[in-house]
Image (tube, grey):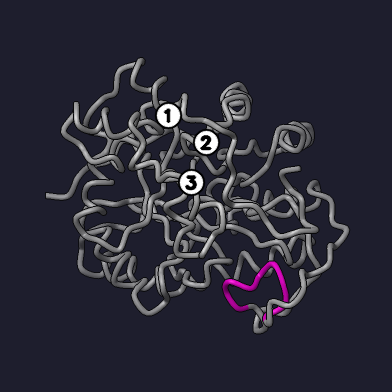
């Protein structure tokens, strides 16, 4: 029997499953099957993005599950994100429509501004993952484009389905990789409240003040790269190769042993018990199952503090210079 995942109620009023399946770096050739199998296991939340280059394949997997009667469309929560080259109003609308069509599910449950930086427009056919920060030859970073976040936010507000806008195809909207000043900025003019803030979050980068700010303003936090350096080893990330894996730290291992759980399950529960949504990826069916079952036990407050004490403010997902989003 599929595991039933708890949900969090967003500012928009919709329910978002607290454990999702993240499809960053899932290859196109296997993505449809991986998404389909994740849904069979019980996943009801798929986290994607235009930047990941696999939305069409992920949509195929979801549609297969729907066609076989495993789920209904309304049972599955789909997140996607707007990439940097499409922040201008008309470009944002164009990309969102293309992304919605790629998924082929009628609507998107959540649409995020992926990064708070605008770059010059690149035609869609010239985009190749993972070269989206730069030209497709990856020889230079794409220049900045002067588009204020206010224009981009208003553009995605216009995509939201409401009584006044019945043709909208997005249920909830939010931001990703934003820091405090820009969140306050968005809140100052937002007509539709941001539902979600997605950030890098793991014991080496806990960001407690940013999370507190989000909670104070009724913005749900999704944490990505919950396993810290693990996600970046396959990318030949220089720092990730030198730092101790979170799975091997005494703090995480001791808690895992005490509860009879895997270190990965402990790291995920460290997030979800604190109300932070997680979106881990795995190619292993057994680990997918373990990740989904990570909310079936509780850590003590002391154990949560013990793991949080690993914080060294170490960020792994940092764009290339001269893009200094987290400076």
Percent coordinates x, y for residue 301 in the rendering: 35, 16
Q: Which residue is mark 1?
A: 275
- From the viewer's perspective, is residue 63 above or below residue 125? above
Q: Which quadrant of the figure has residue 66?
A: bottom left
Q: CB atoms at circles 1 and 2 under 8 Å apart?
A: yes
Real-space CA distance between mark 3 and mark 1, rounded to the nearest whole angstrom: 27 Å
Residue sitting farthest toward the top:
302
Describe the element under mark 2 as helix, strand or loop.
Answer: strand
Of residues 268 and 251, the one nearer the viewer is 251
Q: Which residue is mark 2?
A: 221
Relative to 242, 77 lies left or right: left
Q: Quick one: label 2, few (<14), some, or many (20+) residues within 10 Å?
A: many
Q: Which residue is mark 3?
A: 243
Residue at the spot 62% in from the left edge and 29% down from the top edge: 210
Residue sitting farthest toward the right:
146
Of residues 163 and 132, the one nearer the viewer is 132
Residue 192 magenta-highlighted = no
Real-space CA distance between mark 1 and mark 2, rounded to the nearest whole angstrom: 8 Å
- From the viewer's perspective, is residue 133 above or below residue 232? below
| Region in magenta | 128-136
Of residues 166 and 160, the one nearer the viewer is 160
Relative to 33, 236 lies left or right: right
- Compare marks 3 and 1 and give the one earlier in the sequence: 3
- Quadrant for the C terminus in the image: top right
Percent coordinates x, y for residue 292 in the rendering: 26, 45
Percent coordinates x, y for residue 316 in the rendering: 57, 49
| Callout in the foreground (3, 1) | 3
Describe the element under mark 3 as helix, strand or loop.
Answer: loop
Q: Main secondary structure of the magenta part?
A: loop
Residue 130 magenta-highlighted = yes
Q: Which quadrant of the figure has residue 170?
A: bottom right
Of residues 42 and 14, the one nearer the viewer is 42
């Amino acid at each position: 029997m599929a595991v039933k995942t708890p949900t969090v109620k967003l500012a928009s009023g919709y329910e978002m499953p607290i454990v999702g399946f993240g499809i960053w770096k899932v290859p196109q050739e296997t993505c449809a099957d991986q998404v389909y199998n994740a849904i069979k296991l019980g996943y009801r939340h798929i986290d994607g993005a235009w930047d990941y280059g696999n939305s069409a394949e992920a949509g195929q997997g979801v549609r297969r599950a729907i066609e076989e009667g495993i789920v209904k469309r309304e049972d599955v929560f789909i997140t996607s994100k707007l990439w940097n080259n499409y922040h201008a109003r008309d470009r944002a609308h164009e990309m969102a429509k293309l992304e919605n069509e790629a998924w082929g599910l009628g609507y998107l449950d959540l649409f995020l501004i992926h990064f708070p930086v605008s770059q010059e427009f690149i035609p869609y056919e010239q985009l190749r993952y993972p070269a989206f920060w730069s030209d497709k030859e990856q020889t230079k970073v794409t220049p900045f484009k002067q588009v204020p976040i206010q224009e981009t936010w208003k553009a995605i507000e216009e995509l939201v389905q409401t009584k006044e806008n019945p043709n909208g195809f997005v249920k909830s909207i939010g931001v990703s990789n934003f820091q405090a000043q820009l969140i306050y900025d968005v809140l100052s003019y937002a007509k539709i409240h941001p539902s979600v803030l997605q950030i890098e979050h793991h014991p080496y980068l806990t960001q407690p003040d940013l999370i507190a700010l989000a909670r104070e303003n009724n913005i749900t936090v999704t944490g990505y790269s919950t396993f810290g350096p693990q996600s970046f080893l396959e990318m030949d990330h220089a720092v990730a190769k030198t730092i101790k894996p979170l799975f091997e730290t005494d703090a995480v291992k001791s808690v895992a042993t005490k509860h009879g759980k895997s270190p990965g399950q402990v790291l995920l529960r460290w997030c979800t018990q604190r109300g932070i949504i997680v979106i881990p990826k795995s190619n292993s069916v057994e680990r997918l199952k373990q990740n989904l079952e990570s909310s079936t036990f509780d850590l003590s407050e002391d154990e949560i503090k013990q793991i949080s004490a690993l914080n060294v403010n170490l960020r792994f997902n940092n764009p290339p210079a001269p893009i200094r989003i987290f400076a």
